[in-house]
Image (spheres, rainbow, N blue to C red):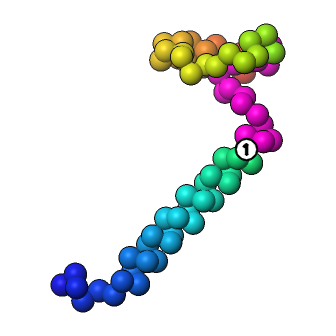
Amino acid sequence: MAASRSPGLAIATAAGIAISAGAMYAMHKDVKAVEGNASAYKTEDEKRNTAGISDKRLSSSDVQQIVSTNSTRAK
């Protein structure tokens, strides 16, 4: 049954995946160029005071604390 399908479907699928991946990469580069390496978990003061320090090492409890602090601040 699989032999009856033309290779066109496989080519179209591969092309669609490649185009999607290329578009995502281009959007990622554009966002980083516009916004920089901004963190969603740091306030503006923290971003200025800890320039160059990443928040990748935050634990889940650290993230939860920061999110809850920021959400109560927004009220």
Specify whether 64 is left or right of 50: left
Q: Is residue 34 magenta?
A: yes
Name the spot of residue 44 as percent of width and height, x first.
79, 19
Tell which of 47 and 64 is nearer to you. Answer: 47
Give percent across and percent down for residue 63.
Answer: 55, 18
Farthest residue to the left: give it. Answer: 1
Which residue sits at x=56%, y=21%? 56
Q: Is residue 33 magenta?
A: yes
- Give how far across and how far down residue 64 sits, in percent: 53, 17
Quick check: can you spot residue 68?
Answer: no
The quarter holding residue 11 reads: bottom left
- Relative to 36, is 11 above or below? below
Which quadrant of the view contains residue 22?
A: bottom right
Q: Position of residue 26 (x, y in %)?
A: 68, 54
Say which of 4 and 63 sits in front: 4
Query: Regarding mark 1 in the picture, which secondary structure is present there?
Result: helix
**What's the residue type where badge 1 is placed?**
Val
Question: In the image, is 2 to the left or to the right of 29?
Answer: left
In this view of the protein, which residue sits in the foreground, 42 or 37?
37
**Quarter holding the C terminus?**
top right
56 with respect to 41 (left or right): left
Residue drawn at x 68%, y 52% as measured from the top left: 27
Magenta range is 32-47
Q: Which residue is mark 1?
A: 31
Residue drawn 68% across the image and 26% down it: 39
The 10 Å Cα crowd at callout 1, few under 14, some 14 to 19, many 20 or more, is few
At 22% across and 85% down in the image, what residue appears? 3
